[in-house]
Image (cartoon, rainbow, N blue to C red):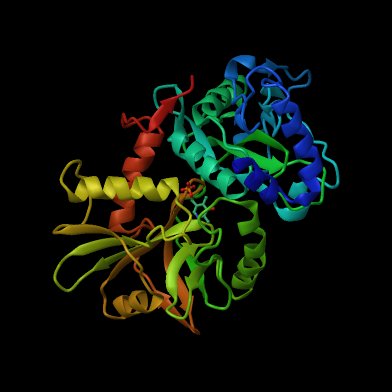
Amino acid sequence: MATLAALRSLGSHRLPQLAARVAAVRHGARRWNSGVTRDPMTGELTSVPNVEPSQVKISQSSTPKPPPDASSLVFGHTFTDHMLTIPWSSGSGWGAPEIKPYSPIVLDPSATVFHYAQGLFEGLKAYRDANGRITLFRPDMNMKRMNNSAARLALPTFNGDAVIELIKQLIRMDKHWIPDKEGYSLYIRPTMIGTQAALGIAPPSQALLFVICSPVGPYYPQGFKPVALYGTTEYSRAAPGGIGAYKLGANYAPGVLIQKEAAKKGYVQNLWLHGPEHYVTEVGTMNAFVVFKHPNGVTELVTPPLDGMILPGITRDSVLSLARDHASGKSPLAGMPEGKFEVNERPVTMKEVKKAAEEGNLVEFFGTGTAAVISPVDRIGYLGTDVHIPTGPDGMGPVSRAVWKQLVGIQTGKIDHPWSVVVA
Ligand SMILES: *Cc1c(COP(=O)(O)O)cnc(C)c1O
């Protein structure tokens, strides 16, 4: 039964091919190749090889480049000498991983990624830390999120620990690309695409997971510079039941024009306000945080809940976790506002933010993400007027400053923490 359902879901154009395979299986071909097992009754694939780090093929670049001067780096424009690729096919599962010279990928023009956006990505950083080690920040979270994105697109899932192992090998090969300068790091971009050469809309029978690395500088080389946001009410980034909670390429192309429109109006980035209530959702491609000081004396850190429209940011999760440990007294952060402190994941409207600003109850507003870590906001254009947000002399507010210090301390190895995973 399950096989029939699977055949139906794959679309009729693939029926004959699959039916032939199932028939072959029924006639005793239980194992097609090593690591592939099928149900003897239904012929369904029950197991295909997962990503296997021990099978990695490594070829060194014969023309390694000298890493450029760190001060000349522009985010995401420079790539290291090597890349990681892992092919997948529905018949044989994940193939042998390869670490090889950074090079173009050749695809058939009919490859599904070009037509139906069967593509997803991740972003994480490797840091050269205060103790001379190279570390990754919570890579397990990126692998979990990548698997969720893959499942949402009917692309193959994989063993996250195995891919982390391979990413570590890639980083070790190119570790001289991580600038030895405070605030610099190696941005790692794992990606997965559907590569099957066929125009039918179906789960692709072939996919490619690849990882490239780019040395990057600090987002704010001259210290924090608060940004002005344009509150977008004319367009939506995400919708209930949609794909906003997944890091899919399809989420980003439609935002470029909106960002350009915000820039034309004199703002640095846009703030996505959802629905007639104008719910605060995300700051461009960052998660949004608001801090209120309520008349009863409570300081409240708020971020919208993971309701399917919000991207589950790893920086978001880390900020919440550090703030909650402060609130509970488990691990107090220096410099936080005095008095009762609360952390809430709850819906927050732009109207509430505007009212708090007008009444002097707004403490700060900031975005979080891997690239900038924390991005303070000092102004939001909303329905024709500007809402002004307080910022300290260093550009930050009291909560974001305290959390940022702790977070960056962990990322740079000044603070020992299990979130930091040693690569070399
Ligand atoms: C990647 C991303 C974030 C931030 O996630 P991090 O894991 O913290 O880098 C937030 N919002 C969107 C839309 C994103 O794509």
Residue 265 spot, x, y in % from top left: 60, 76
Q: Is residue 397 left or right of residue 109?
A: left
In-front residue for pair 229/242: 242
**The N terminus, quarter of image:** top right
In-front residue for pair 261/111: 111
The residue drawn where x is 62% and y is 64% is: 255
Residue 227 spot, x, y in % from top left: 48, 63
Residue 334 visible here:
no
Residue at the bottom extreme?
384
The residue drawn where x is 45% and y is 61% is: 226
The residue drawn where x is 25% and y is 73% is: 361
Image quadrant assignment for residue 393:
bottom left
Q: Is residue 78 left or right of residue 297?
A: right
Image quadrant assignment for residue 193:
top right
Residue at the right extreme?
109
Relative height, residue 50 to residue 386 (above, below)? above
